[in-house]
Image (cartoon, rainbow, N blue to C red):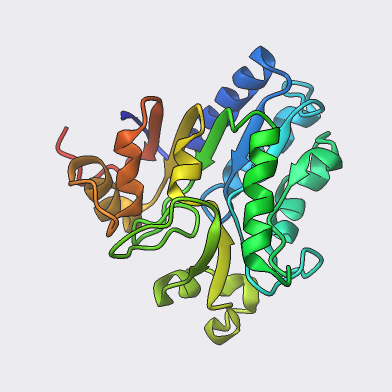
Amino acid sequence: MRVRTFATPHHAARALAREIAKALNANPRLVLGLPTGRTPILLYRELVRLNQTGTIDFSGATTFNLDEFAGVPAGDPRSYHAFMRRHLFDHVNLQRRRINFLNGAARNAEAECARYEAAIRRSGGIDLQILGLGANGHIGFNEPADALIAATHRARLRSATRRANASLFGNHVRAVPHEALSMGVATILRARRIILLATGSTKARCVERMLEGRISPRVPASFLQLHRNVDVWLDQAAALRLTG
């Protein structure tokens, strides 16, 4: 995995936004995989700025988000769909019909996950997958476990992950759903290129285990070592424990 370190989260976000702009300029019909969480907010802010200045054009792009809370409909302001609208979708020229999301409120979660896998295949596959990194090593909502589920699936959320998402639910951890729908690790690894963005000292231990440890389902992000085209972009705080 190729590692780049930036002075601050803002520097990393600006560089990643420029990289996405470069990819879209090369392929206006780019299929993008997108994350949620605190880390990509700076990235989305920069993408909005580049779109508004005419530097980046989303009109031909297609997006697939990694995950959504189970039982939370798209119109709920606490949903990841609403998060993406607030931070990106409502502010750029991305066509709504090209925005793809898991339906957390689907009655049949298994059928919804299968639908999403089929939609990704019909799109031709994800060209560029952007990832965040959970402090416990999760990517998407693939939590540490004895074994990982390959395809898009219903996932049980760990307490640490629920605490990390409490801000979306009025800072009430008990209100955070116990389950979510998520792309599986194999689905993520089928992307043609992956860029993982991790910032802050709370991610440093996990970054070390992801890059320098063994491949293990206890560190789901470590499976990125199997991919041929992965970049890991860090700020100095997140890179603190790396030996290389």
Query: How many numbered discs, if any?
Result: 0
**50, 169: nearer the viewer:** 169
> Which residue shows up at 70% across the image and 66% down it?
79
Q: Quadrant of the C terminus?
A: top left
Q: Is residue 147 above or below residue 192?
A: below
Query: Does any portion of residue 9 appear in the rendered image?
Result: no
Query: Does any portion of residue 100 appear in the rendered image?
Result: yes
Say left or right for 77 vs 33. Answer: right
Say left or right for 80 vs 73. Answer: left
**10, 23: nearer the viewer:** 23
Q: Residue furthest top?
A: 26
Say left or right for 85 vs 27. Answer: right
Percent x, y of residue 166: 55, 75
Q: Splitting the image into 4 quarters, where does residue 22 fall?
A: top right
Percent x, y of residue 1: 31, 30
**99, 22: nearer the viewer:** 99
Q: Is residue 185 above or below residue 13?
A: below
Say left or right for 121 vs 162. Answer: right
> Which residue shows up at 45% across the image and 69% down it?
161
> Which residue shows up at 36% across the image and 25% down it?
228
Percent x, y of residue 177: 58, 77
Percent x, y of residue 194: 47, 33
Q: Residue furthest left?
A: 243
